């Protein structure tokens, strides 16, 4: 039985990726730090480890000798990264360097989960080979992680996702926030002038599984169709049977963030779609999966 190591398995994408590999018959080692991983399976092994601690991380690699590592652990609080740049750099860059340094010694393959925030959002529609230009510190540190991964001697892949959503553990994503508010009959404000290409977490996991199993290398965009936050909120409400009239429009100028946000960080994925067999892109498929996760 092949072993894969997934860092950040207590996050939504980490959890869904672990579940996808377990269903395929892999032994999975999942790391976590502050949050527990809600998986109980004889082929799943939990390891509490800080990726910034090279020695502790080394013990995980030595004990399990994974065939591949999927690096998902990150400091994903955009405003938090801007406020504490030292912490953001330590986790997102130094942590990634640690993972890739050990992966180069113990593994044959590495995959790194990145973000649309490596782009400035001035034009939107960024392709896999467009040059990154982050406008906040979170995006800068994630770009540093990309460089650390692609410059390692391993066969490696970078997967960029956008506004990851779905049901499961981890930080409250926009879909979970929507459901919490709408189910209580509360109004929700959603941006009409910020555009992304939202990524459904289970479809992201299935795509990562395919990329790893095929040993694909390079940069991949696993994203859905372009829409505003408001349009996305309406889709989720309609899919899950909530009242869309509770969703109210708001603009970016009215929103108060500490760190700047890209206005249009939508990603193109034609190149990736031509390579992968997994249907990760269509909104219809994503909403069907989201509805299934809810039940």
Image (cartoon, helix red, strand yellow):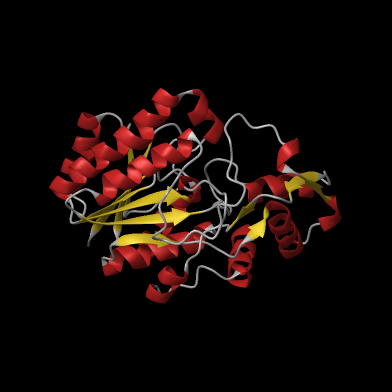
Relative height, residue 277 to residue 117 (above, below): below
Q: Position of residue 225 (x, y in %)?
A: 59, 65
Relative height, residue 138 to residue 158 (above, below): above
**Residue 217, quarter of picture:** bottom left
Identify the residue shown where x is 57% and y is 49%.
122
Quarter in which the C terminus is drawn: bottom right
Q: Nearer the viewer, residue 196 or 208?
A: 196
Identify the residue shown where x is 50% and y is 68%.
280
Q: Position of residue 172 (x, y in %)?
A: 60, 42
Q: Position of residue 110 (x, y in %)?
A: 26, 53
Relative height, residue 34 to residue 216 (above, below): above
**Residue 58, quarter of picture:** top left
Q: Nearer the viewer, residue 2 or 82?
A: 82
Horizontally, residue 48 falls left or right of residue 264, namely left
Identify the residue shown where x is 26% and y is 38%.
97
Q: Position of residue 249 (x, y in %)?
A: 80, 48
Horizontally, residue 184 falls left or right of residue 27, namely right
Q: Nearer the viewer, residue 88 or 242?
A: 88
Quarter in which the N terminus is drawn: bottom left
- Could you tell me if residue 30 is visible in this image? no
Q: Nearer the viewer, residue 61 or 110?
A: 110
Identify the residue shown where x is 38% and y is 53%.
41
- Could you tell me if residue 142 is visible in this image? yes
Q: How many marks?
A: 0
């Amino acid at each position: 039985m092949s072993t894969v190591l997934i860092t950040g398995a207590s996050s939504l994408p980490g959890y869904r990726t672990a579940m996808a590999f377990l269903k395929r018959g892999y032994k999975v080692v999942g790391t976590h730090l502050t949050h527990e991983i809600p998986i109980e399976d004889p082929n799943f092994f939990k390891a509490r480890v800080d990726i910034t601690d090279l020695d502790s991380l080394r013990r995980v690699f030595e004990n399990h000798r994974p065939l591949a590592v999927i690096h998902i652990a990150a400091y994903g609080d955009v405003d938090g990264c801007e406020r504490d740049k030292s912490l953001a750099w330590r986790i997102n860059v130094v942590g990634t360097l640690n993972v890739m340094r050990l992966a180069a010694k113990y593994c044959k393959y590495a995959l790194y989960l990145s973000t649309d925030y490596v782009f400035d959002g001035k034009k939107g529609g960024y392709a896999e080979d467009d040059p990154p230009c982050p406008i906040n510190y979170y995006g800068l540190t994630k770009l540093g992680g990309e460089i650390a991964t692609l410059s390692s001697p391993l066969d490696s892949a970078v997967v960029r996702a956008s506004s990851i959503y779905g049901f499961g553990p981890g930080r409250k994503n926009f879909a979970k926030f929507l459901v919490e508010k709408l189910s209580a009959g509360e109004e929700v404000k959603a941006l009409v002038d910020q555009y992304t290409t939202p990524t459904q977490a289970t479809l992201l996991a299935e795509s990562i599984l395919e990329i790893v199993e095929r040993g694909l290398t390079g940069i991949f965009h696993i994203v859905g169709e372009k829409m505003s936050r408001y349009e996305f909120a309406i889709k989720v409400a309609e899919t899950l049977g909530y009242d869309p009239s509770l969703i109210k429009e708001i603009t970016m100028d009215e929103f108060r963030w500490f760190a700047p946000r890209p206005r249009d960080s939508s990603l193109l994925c034609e190149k990736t779609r031509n390579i992968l067999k997994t249907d990760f892109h269509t909104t219809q498929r994503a909403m069907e999966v989201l509805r299934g996760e809810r039940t």
